[in-house]
Amino acid sequence: GHNIVLISNHQTEADPAIIALLLEKTNPRISEDLTYVAGDRVIT
């Protein structure tokens, strides 16, 4: 099986980009494999 981590946060449009940038140098594989799910208000 695979490990799955769910992180919830108040709706912020910049979150996906910031999380990817923070993980890019230390964990590039995680950064590339992340999947973001958001409501219809989020625009990225």
Image (spheres, rainbow, N blue to C red):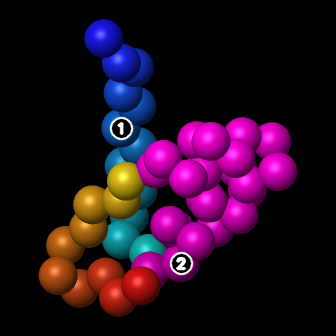
Image coordinates for residue 3, horizontal then vertical, percent: 40, 20
Q: Please identify the quadrant where the N terminus is shown.
A: top left
Q: Is residue 19 above or below residue 11?
A: above
Residue 31 or residue 12, whichever sits in front: 31
**In the image, what residue occupies the spot 36% across and 59% down?**
36
**In the image, what residue occupies the spot 82% across and 51% down?**
25
Q: Residue furthest top?
A: 1
Q: Is residue 5 above or below residue 8?
A: above
Crowdedness of circle 1 by 10 Å Cα count: few (<14), some, many (20+)? few
Q: Residue furthest right?
A: 25
Q: Which residue in the protein does label 1 denote?
A: 6
**In the image, what residue occupies the spot 48% across and 47% down?**
33
Q: CA distance from mark 1 to mark 2?
A: 17 Å
Residue 9 or residue 28, whichever sits in front: 28
Q: Is residue 39 above or below residue 9?
A: below
Image coordinates for residue 38, horizontal then vertical, percent: 26, 67
SS class, disc 1: loop
Q: Quadrant of residue 30?
A: top right
Callout 1 touching callout 2 (CB < 8 Å): no
Q: Which residue in the protein does label 2 denote?
A: 14
The chief SS type of the magenta part is helix
Q: Which residues are magenta?
A: 13-34
SS class, disc 2: loop
In the image, what residue type sits under mark 2? Answer: Ala
In the image, what residue type sits under mark 1? Answer: Leu
Instruction: Answer left or right for 13 relative to 42.
Output: right
Crowdedness of circle 2 by 10 Å Cα count: few (<14), some, many (20+)? few
Residue 33 is a magenta residue: yes
Residue 1 or residue 43, whichever sits in front: 1
